[in-house]
Amino acid sequence: MDIDFFEISNAIPDGICLTDNKGIILKVNKRFSEITGIDFKEAVGRSIDKLPSQPFLGKINEESQEITLSETNFKNVISIMFAKQKKSMSSLFYIKKTNKQVLLTINLLMDREGKLNQVLHVLRDMSEIIELKEKLEDIEKERNRYINEINYLRNNIVETKNLITNSSSMKKVKEIIDYVAKTDATILITGETGCGKEVVANEIQSKSNRKMEPFIKVNCAAIPESLIEAELFGYEKGAFTGAAPKTKIGMFEMANNGTIFLDEIGELSLSTQTKLLRVLQEKEIIRIGGTKSIKLDVRVLAATNQDLLELIKQRKFREDLYFRLNVVPIKLPPLRERREDIPILAYHFLKEFNLKYNKEKVFHNSAIVALESYNWPGNVRELKNIVERLIIIDDDCQITAEKIKNIINQYTVTSSISKGFTLKETLNMVEKEMIENALKIYGSTHKAAKALGITQPTVFRKAKALNIKLNGKY
């Protein structure tokens, strides 16, 4: 059964127009009409030069002899093609009627004697392709912007993540960091919640030889136990129920040639600890559902607020993993044990949040004393949160001791209520803590009373009532 070519051509996405050697249109397919906006009844039998709005022939550039976007005539196009000995020529152009960008390819169909018989014009709608190309160019520009931004941040990480300290204990920590940062040693950072373990990890990374490589942070406590291994080590497609239909690389692979920071490592299950130990020993991972070992070059920093030795006794943490992690231990003192850091940190956070919220607040002289008198159970994180709250709670430009005490008391009262203390017990605890801290800082009842805004006899009276021991020097 004979099938007409143009019946077949109706099933393809390109527009087809067949002319004789004079440019008279013999046939067009449906797609031609859709692309040009010209009905086949208007086209067939007409000269291609006399179609409405002459939609698709371009102007020939005299220097390059190439067809361009403006109109020309059939005869000239064919002449140029013969002169250049081309049987096919293509050009991009724009069809105003349908708002399409089209690639026109003109093909010369010769007879057996080598004379021009017919001309096949093929139109391909390039609008979607060009739109995709433009989107890809935009994505590439955005990607380059992100790369430049990442490089800038990496180059300036020392300035933005520096440890801020005046205390001798934290200066010793900085010395350790300077010694070990440029090595590949595994480091275990310990300390209470909020005392700056992540800041120390940032400091190590910023001074390391890997500072321009990936730095992947993982909060082990924030990832469900059922997902932690998949997140750390990745998985092959279809490895388990609910897995994505394609392979997913894990965070260790993402950190290859760089550093991974495992925060709250004490929260890992024994099963995950075993796999982590293998990664540290063999320096390779096997994705879940996979069989192939993938070699890695990753430096490991770990942190915890838990007593890992106690967890080892309770058989909740592997002893061999502990020794693998504890190559260089860094123990951070709580803020209450380095009170000389409170003023410098407070002013640092004041500057940061003034800039963030477009404020110009300042500390009253008594404000720093009030901050130094508090015990800071939440450490540096709590100090940062309280300074931020002080910046945003009102429009008064001055931060006073009274405002600080109100916020601290709100925190203490909330904590005490949750623990079942009465109002009187809570007030006594707050007063006792503040008086003891003031005495410790200032060394005399007179100076402590002045800092607290009360009289010296009141200090003596409250010390007796609250069972605060006053040595002879007071």
Image (cartoon, rainbow, N blue to C red):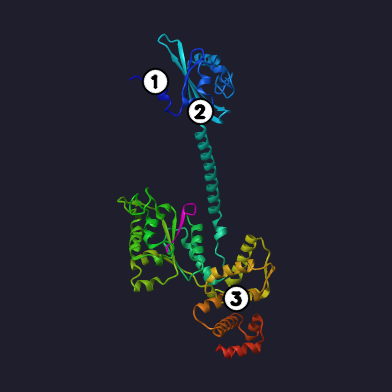
Question: Alpha carbon of mark 3 to alpha carbon of mark 1: how far?
Answer: 93 Å
Query: Is residue 471 among what the camera can see?
Result: no
**Residue 449: within the magenta?**
no
Report x, y in % for residue 334.
51, 73
The label nearer to you, 3 versus 1, is: 1
Q: What element carries label 2?
A: helix
The label nearer to you, 2 versus 3, is: 2
Residue bearing mark 1: 4
Q: Which amino acid does label 2 sit on?
A: Glu
Residue bearing mark 2: 34
Report the span colored magenta.
210-220
- Rendered image: mark on residue 372: 3
Q: Sequence order check: which comes first, mark 2 or mark 3? A: 2
Label 3, residues with CA under 10 Å away: few <14, some 14-19, many ≥20? many
Q: Residue at x 41, y 8 (%)?
A: 113
Label 1, residues with CA under 10 Å away: few <14, some 14-19, many ≥20? few
Residues 158 and 230: in front is 230
Q: Sequence order check: which comes first, mark 3 or mark 1? A: 1
Quarter location, residue 442? bottom right
Q: Which residue is drawn at 60% across and 81% down?
A: 438
Question: Alpha carbon of mark 2 to alpha carbon of mark 1: how far?
Answer: 20 Å
Q: What element carries label 3?
A: helix
